[in-house]
Amino acid sequence: MTSNKLPAPAFEQRLNRYEEKLNLVKKQIRTTSILRLVVFFSTVVGIYLLSSVSYIPVTLLGIAGLATFVYLIRKHQSQELKKARYQAFVEINHQELEFLKKKTGLADAGINFVTADHPYSDDLDLFGKRSLFQLINRSALVSGKNKVAERLLSPILDEKLLFQRQEAIAELSTKLSWRQEFQAVGLLSKYLSGEKPEDQNDLPGLLNWAKETTKIYDTWFFRFLLVLNPLIGFFVVIAIVLHWIAPVYFLFFLMLPSGILGPKLSEMGRIHERLTKKNNLLSKYARLFRMVENQNFTSALNQETRHIIVEKDAEAGKEIEHLSAIAAAFDYRLNILMGILLNVFLLWDILQTIRLERWKAKNSQHIHQWFNALSTFDELSSFAGFAFGNTESTFPTIISGDFKVEGNNIKHPLISSENCIGNPVKFTGWQQFQVITGANMAGKSTYLRTVGINLVLAMTGAPVLAESFEFKPVQLFTGIKTSDSLQDGESYFYAELKRLKELIDRLKSDQSLFIILDEILRGTNSADKQKGSKALITQLISFHCSGMIATHDLTLGELALRFPKHVSNKRFEVEIQNDNLKFDYLLKDGISENLNASFLMKKMGITV
């Protein structure tokens, strides 16, 4: 499944369109602001001039002026919403164009997901500056971003699930407008209220709150009070207005709501704290749920995930809109005057608490599934955006049975196409190892990372950068960027030994691994390194694993003679032409014939 679409014209067209709309709405906002001032001052001046004539024109002018002013306020709010939406689309398409140039500087680096103890994350630059995460992540939600990271860190080994994810990602990659609208809705609050992604971290607390389904206020007693208190309050006020009773009787009426609410104020405060100022956040989620509900999907995984959100007895969008309305109503208590009036006459806090208890009773069993499904769409959309933007990519063929990794013209996704040289990879069966030799800067390490990072992509269900790619899902283990630790008091050599011990322990626990190692045992002298490297490869051959090992030590190539069924030699070469190095970065069979360390030292002015 390859894409023949050209993303750059699509992104440029959308960027230009929304920049034009953004500039237009900014002008409209300025015009509306000026009109509000004109209406306000004209109304004030008009009322002043007409006040000496008659109250009728003053009243009419006041009503007309107020109505016009309110209309302009609402229009201004609508224009601000449009402005935020257009700003989101401008940001999205500008970033997509940067991604096409392999520029990731503006993207979230996912620093909080960096871990040195992971089997391959650090070696393959999955997170941090110039990372795969930056190139993939387009999430509208923090939960979606977390799922993207989880998917990169946890390979999927189930062939059926991988195929379903491929179908889902391929389908979403064709829905450019829907994906960008989904992403834009997620960004709206950033431009409207300055919300940062971490502001969504309250969601787990909200989900845990939804589990609490104990009914405290939704009882016949409090429901009876909700009817009794307003009735008494209404009759007391009417009686006072009609002079049937003295105003002092209103104080006696206040004893009823005070007696009911007084002991409950701190508890009501705790309940409200869970939802306070969540209206905008919940409204955003409601819109995202509605987008999923209103979209048709054909792939099995997308249909299954949508079905979780669109249930007959409880539709996520409708129910989250209802919760958002309750949260907004509960926030009225933040206005002291309005809060007092509503609680005195309507027992407002108890009314909203009962509404919340009923909402939780109906939806507590669904809400976690809803938000999990929504974050799944968010995560799949990120990978779909990556698929759409990489026209050279292809969805790999997933096989079962014996281990296999085979691809043609595989490339690194973070290297621009004009600078990237593709190479093949081929492993058929376990206990197969390739010793890759070559000069400095010839391309060995880049090749290792290219194979590794494409395997990671393949095991997320995403397309890979290759003409063709066929593989059986496998656990991946790498050792490329081992470093010492001053904080832990570890030398480079000891850190490398710990990494290799972890590898052997995994193999002894019957894990099947694809292994990628670069210049093993470089922290010791040449004789120990050579002896230890040969011993390690010999040991690896006895386990259920395969892999590639890059080295400058040409003697490791001799292992192919000793283990012809298990070890083969590959190389990257360099040529010296006209006193300059020439690299072709092409993988070849055999052991490297040319090394360049001495030449490079001389070029740097170092006497050799």
Image (cartoon, rainbow, N blue to C red):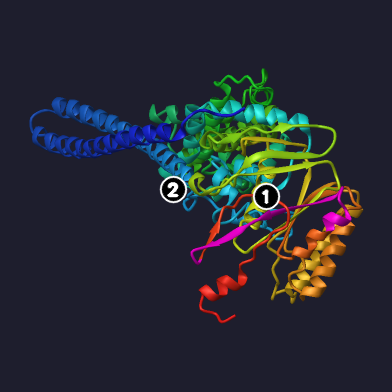
Residue drawn where x is 59% and y is 25% of the image: 171
Tag in front: 2 or 1: 1
Q: Residue furthest front?
A: 578
Residue drawn where x is 73% and y is 70% of the image: 522
- The magenta segment is 559-579
Residue 582 percent location from the top left of the image: 54, 58
Q: Quadrant of the N terminus?
A: top right
Q: How far apart are marks 2 and 1 (CA)?
A: 54 Å
Amino acid type of the residue that numbered disc 1 sits on in the rendered structure:
Lys
Whether residue 335 is visible to the viewer of this picture, yes or no, is: no
Q: Quadrant of the C terminus?
A: bottom right
Label 1 environment density (alpha carbons within 10 Å; few <14, some 14–19, many ≥20): some
Residue 427 percent location from the top left of the image: 77, 43
Residue on which disc 1 sits: 588
Callout 1: helix, strand or loop?
Answer: strand
Of 139 and 465, which appears nearest the observer? 465
Residue 369 percent location from the top left of the image: 69, 32
The answer to whether residue 460 is above or below residue 242 is below
Name the N-terminal-most of marks 2 and 1. Answer: 2
- In the image, which disc is placed on residue 194? 2
Amino acid type of the residue that numbered disc 2 sits on in the rendered structure:
Gly
Which of the 4 quarters of the picture holds residue 537?
A: bottom right
